[in-house]
Image (tube, rainbow, N blue to C red):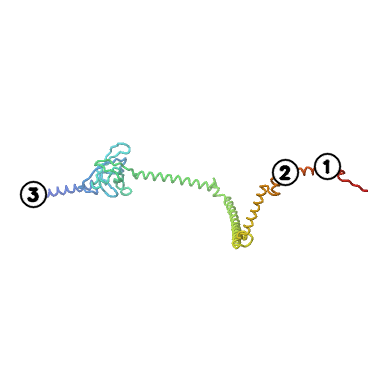
């Protein structure tokens, strides 16, 4: 009897140890997530308007790596944006990467899968203390996505309906588009306009060829003239290269300048005629006397002319 009692007590101790081990394993699987229960951890808080199925034990990720888990989810109803408080635990080894400019948002594994909390690290922020509050960033929800999809589909349906109405009016020949679609007058006018533009383009092309030909002929003439000038041929060539003309012009200019000087200084007959007014006065007086004489002759011809037959 004593041996049987001893054996039962030993089996009981093994059962107790196995039970405790299984309990610890279950607790770790439900609360520890992908982190070890023996890792030191720190806590932070965040507030969300809707957790969309986030539960206690859900994983906390950062940059795609699981760094902790959700410890507690509870209603607080502080305001419209802070309806639910979420308390999270993360490993101490990554705590220095969570700064005061970090943000958290909800994520989903798959399209309608389990929820997790994503920590978005900040850039250049200051370290936070244990128990700090990290602001949330609304990444949207599946319900909101579906609502937006339904709204977009409704707008697309309205647009298709309006397009059908426009096409129906076009088929009936209503409006400008309808006239364009059903009336061939515009096509006729465009065809005629195209023909006229073709003729005009051909005429412009011919005129362009004629202008180019004229320019080429003028260029050839100028080139020939330049060659003749360079070769001292013709009058222009002689004018450009023979210094005799320049010498003659210079001498003639000098003589004319001398004559003009003498005229201006009243030298010689022409100079006196230009500068002395006495000759002008005498010429005027002579003209007056001659005019008076002619008048007198016309009035009394017998005074100056006597005619006798015998």
Query: Mark number for residue 188?
Result: none
Q: Of marks 3 and 2, which one's residue comes earlier in the chain?
A: 3
Residue ID for mark 2? 278
> On the picture, is 4 further left or further right than 141?
left
Foreground: disc 3 or disc 2: 2
Q: Evaluate if marks 3 and 2 touch, with contact meaning CB atoms under 8 Å apart.
A: no
Q: Of marks 1 and 2, which one's residue comes earlier in the chain?
A: 2
Residue at point 8%, 49% (across, down)? 6
Q: Position of residue 292 (x, y in %)?
A: 80, 42
Residue ID for mark 1? 296
> In this view, which residue lies farthest toward the top?
78
Which one is in front, 5 or 208? 208
Which one is in front, 257 or 89? 257
In 3D space, how far apart are the residues under numbered discs 1 and 3 (Cα atoms)?
193 Å
Q: Position of residue 133 (x, y in %)?
A: 27, 40
State the SS at label 1. Answer: helix
> On the picture, is 30 further left or further right than 176?
left
Which one is in front, 196 or 235? 235
């Amino acid at each position: 009897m004593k041996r049987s009692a001893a054996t039962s007590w030993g089996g009981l101790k093994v059962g107790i140890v196995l039970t405790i081990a299984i309990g610890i394993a279950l607790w770790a699987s439900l609360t520890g997530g992908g982190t070890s229960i023996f890792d030191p951890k720190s806590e932070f808080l965040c507030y969300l308007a809707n957790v969309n199925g986030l539960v206690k034990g859900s994983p906390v990720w950062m940059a795609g790596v699981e760094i902790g888990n959700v410890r507690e989810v509870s209603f607080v109803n502080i305001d419209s944006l802070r309806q639910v408080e979420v308390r999270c635990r993360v490993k101490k080894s990554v705590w220095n990467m969570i700064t005061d400019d970090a943000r958290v948002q909800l994520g989903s594994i798959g399209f309608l899968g389990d929820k997790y909390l994503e920590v978005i690290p900040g850039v250049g922020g200051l370290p936070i203390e244990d128990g700090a509050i990290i602001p949330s960033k609304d990444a949207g929800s599946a319900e909101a996505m579906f609502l937006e999809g339904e709204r977009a589909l409704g707008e697309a349906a309205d647009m298709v309906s309006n397009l059908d109405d426009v096409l129906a009016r076009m088929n009936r020949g209503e409006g400008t588009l309808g006239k364009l679609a059903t009336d061939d007058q515009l096509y006729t006018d465009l065809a005629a306009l195209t023909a006229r533009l073709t003729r005009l383009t051909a005429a412009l092309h011919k005129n362009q060829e004629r202008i180019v030909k004229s320019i080429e002929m003028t260029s050839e003439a100028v080139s020939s003239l330049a060659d003749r000038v360079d070769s001292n041929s013709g009058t222009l060539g002689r004018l450009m290269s023979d210094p005799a003309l320049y010498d003659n012009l210079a001498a003639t200019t000098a003589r004319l300048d001398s004559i003009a000087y003498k005229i201006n200084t009243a030298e010689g007959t022409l100079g006196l005629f230009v500068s002395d007014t006495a000759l002008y006065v005498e010429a005027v007086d002579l003209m007056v006397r001659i005019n008076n004489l002619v008048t007198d002759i016309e009035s009394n011809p017998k005074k100056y002319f006597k005619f006798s037959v015998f």
